[in-house]
Amino acid sequence: MIAYFKEIVSGAWSLIVGMRLTAGFGLGRTMTVHYPFERLDVTPNFRGHIDLIIDPDTAESKCITCMMCEKTCPSSCIGIQAEKPEGAKKKILVEYHLDFTKCSLCGNCVEVCPVDALEFSHEYNLVGTSRHDFHFELVSRLRDKVKKLGIVPKPKPVPDAPAPAPEA
Ligand code: SF4
Ligand code: SF4
């Protein structure tokens, strides 16, 4: 008989606890995010597709076209095109292709880059109707971002004038 009443009390108590939680969530602050009109901030270490970082001094990429990222990518999803402009000493990055359909987000390319030219984007809204919608050219993306953010290259420092030759 005691066990029977104990069971009733414990059942009633669990009902009260459950109702209290339901009422707390039901009457409390709304937790619904009205996507796509509202968005949540992603955590700083969120991994979207890789992206080139803007060098604030030049408003260009920091990439030195060493090709380490392309060589280290286990999925062969990076294709870099570099050219040496006439009279220049070094090659410059012309196009940086990423096939995001093959990327495993392993991070090798970001880690291996000797000049920290790559980062993971916070892009989580990707949608497409064909696999080609996930092929990105990152130099164009970087230039679009520079334009959108209104970043301008910093003026280059003027070299000091040579000291006057000592009088004879
Ligand atoms: S994150 Fe990994 S798989 Fe993706 S592009 Fe970089 S190296 Fe390749
Ligand atoms: S590893 Fe860095 S510097 Fe080298 S090609 Fe890739 S992005 Fe450019």
Image (cartoon, rainbow, N blue to C red):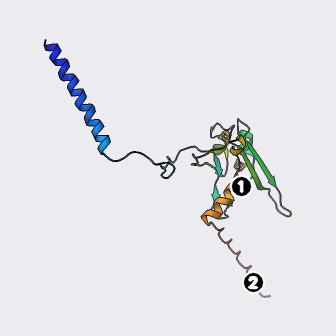
Disc 2: residue Cβ within 8 A of ligand 2's nearest atom: no
Q: Position of residue 2 (x, y in %)?
A: 13, 14
- Real-space Cα distance between discs 1 and 2? 45 Å
Q: Residue furthest left?
A: 2
Taking the spot 52% from the left edge, 50% from the top edge, the residue there is: 36
Q: Quadrant of residue 14?
A: top left
Q: Nearer the viewer, residue 6 or 117?
A: 6
Quarter of the view holding residue 102: top right
Where residue 162 sits, quadrant-wise, is: bottom right
Q: Amino acid at mark 2?
A: Pro
**First in sequence: mark 1 or mark 2?**
1
Residue at the outermost top position: 1
- Is residue 56 visible in the rendered image? The answer is no
For label 1, the residue is: 139
Mark whose residue sits in front, 1 or 2: 1
How many labels sit on residues? 2
* Residue 73 shows in this picture: yes
Looking at the picture, how far across and down is residue 116, in whole percent?
A: 64, 51
> In the rendered view, would you say 22 is above or below 53?
above
Is residue 51 found left or right of 33 in the rendered image?
right
Residue picked out by circle 2: 164
| Amino acid at pointer 1 | Val
Judging from the image, what secondary structure is the residue with disc 1 in?
helix
Q: The C terminus lies in which quarter of the figure?
A: bottom right
Q: Position of residue 71 (x, y in %)?
A: 74, 40
Callout 2: helix, strand or loop? loop
- Residue 69 locus on image (x, y percent): 71, 44
Residue at 28%, 36% in the rendered image: 21
Q: Which image quarter holds the N terminus?
A: top left
Q: Report the side of 56 relative to 45 (left or right).
A: right
